Image (spheres, coloured by chain):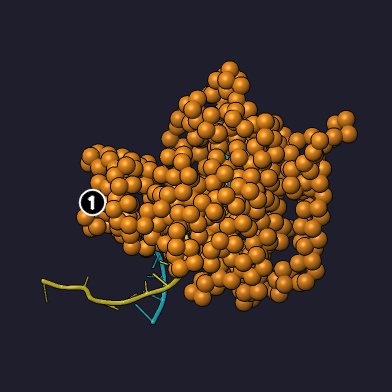
Chain colours: A orange, B cyan, C yellow
Amino acid sequence: MYALVDCNNFYVSCERVFDPRLEGRPVVVLSNNDGCLISRSDEAKALGLKMGEPWHLVRPLLEQQQVRVFSSNYGLYGDMSRRVVQVLAGFAAGIEVYSIDEAFLDFHGMNLLAPDLHAYGAEVRARVQQHTGIPTCVGIAPTKTLAKLANRQARKEGGSGVVLLDTPARWQAALAAAPVDSIWGVGRRYARKLFDLNVTTGAELAALPEAWLRRHLGGVVGQRLWRELHGQPCLEWNPAPADDDDQGHEDDPSGRRHSVAYTRSFGRPQHEAAALAEAVATFAAKAAAKLRQHERVAHLVTVLLGTSRFTPGAEPSTRTAVIHLPFASSDTVHITQAALQGLAQLRRAGVAYHRAGIVLSGLERPGQAQLGLFKAAPEMARPERTQLMAALDGLNSRFGRQLVRTAAAGVPTRAHGHPQPDAWAGRAAMRSPLYTTGWDELWQVG
DNA sequence: TCTGGGGTCCTAGGACCC
DNA sequence: TCTGGGGTCCTAGGACCC
């Protein structure tokens, strides 16, 4: 048995924890760059606001309905997520953190400890609410896909917030009530294919032959889906790495993570070489810091530069350049140099770019880095480079983002004694404070 | 003027190797 | 007439997830 615990309207719920006046009111949270709606309270959903809807299109409606709007505050959400996971970890032998707002719990053998799994699920829910203020729903079933289904049902019913699908009769009834496009693993493309064949519910999907799913829904992916829907667990269990002991699988010594990225849209389109270089160098530093946080080094630096994705035209909007590092590194300076080299290859004079990004791949653990056979000992191997990066990370995490940076990333301009946002920086005009992670922004009571 | 970001997995096809 | 078999590695593209 697996339980899937999913936080309700997670980002909105985080905002509400620190401002209870938002309770009962329509609230939305916007994506990076204040682009579109990515979290909506129930009241906002009731107004017909859709997930992913561009903000600028619904802005009049939001104002008219007095919807509270927030820029996203990932510092806050990430910290709240960590707290939720901490609570959940006490309830099961194993936990798999699936995303920022949901986690699977391993309930194998749990019926011995907790004969009434439904009641146990309710206890999990109550404890998370009590310790973090975040409301959740819990779905319990023999496979991850069915646990997802149970969770969805729990959310829809709005009753106890817990649904247990522990017998074929129960999950078949749930499948019959579930639109086929709500099944985990059925996305837009597959849903259209299925609707065209008059397959409209989860039950009808499960009733198709296993071989049909294998042939038409992505090969083994479709076959696994079929089995999961029939109560046979097929999806891998990827337990959360312990905080201080991130062990990889035996057959994958580099660990599960295969890439680390930092890509952002600009607040305004940019065409000047200098501004683009500063942006790319800044993103390279962010990506490198993330890499170090995961204790990995990278062989490949991919730079991407994108024009507007929404002007109809045959040209693909994003172009990429891949730079192979001579040795794997997580050093901001090495990665910045490679990134600027990639930028020089990509940039076309006079073109206005809307976004840029860095993807680091070919990851290894630092100790395992392959040395180039004919290269001099890599600079990264020198302990003072590692110390330098550790000092940089320490200062930046203590005193704020990018306080210490490479010259390539540019110097912030100041006006009236206050640092001004860079020309390319994304918009985030309505961000709530970093209530729990920023010394200058701690929650004030009273 | 205005539309997010970060991931994973699978498959097919080509280059290359013995 | 007739042209093996088994691999690996890489890339691109497609699908999915939150």
| Residue sitting nearer the eye, B12 or A203 | A203
Place residue A231 in its image quadrant: bottom left
Residue at x 50%, y 60% (from the top left corner): A105
Indicate the position of residue A56 as horizontal and vertical percent values: 57, 25
Q: Residue at x 74, y 47 (%)?
A: A436
Measured as percent of width and height from the top left, residue A142 is found at: 38, 60
Q: Nearer the viewer, residue A37 or A285?
A: A37
Viewer-side residue, A240 vs A390: A240
Is residue A36 visible in the rendered image? The answer is: yes
Given residues A407 and A417, the one toward you in this image is A417
Instruction: Give the residue pinned by disc 1.
Output: A207
In terms of secondary structure, where does tag 1 sit? helix
Q: Quadrant of the N terminus of chain A?
A: bottom left
- In the image, A138: left or right of B13? right
Q: Write the residue at 58% across / 17% down.
A: A64
- Please determine whether, in this image, residue A8 is positioned above or below residue A310: below
The quarter in which the C terminus of chain A is drawn is top right
Instruction: From the top left corner, tell me how far across and down residue A263 is, in percent.
Output: 60, 46
Is there any visible trace of residue A54 in the rendered image? no
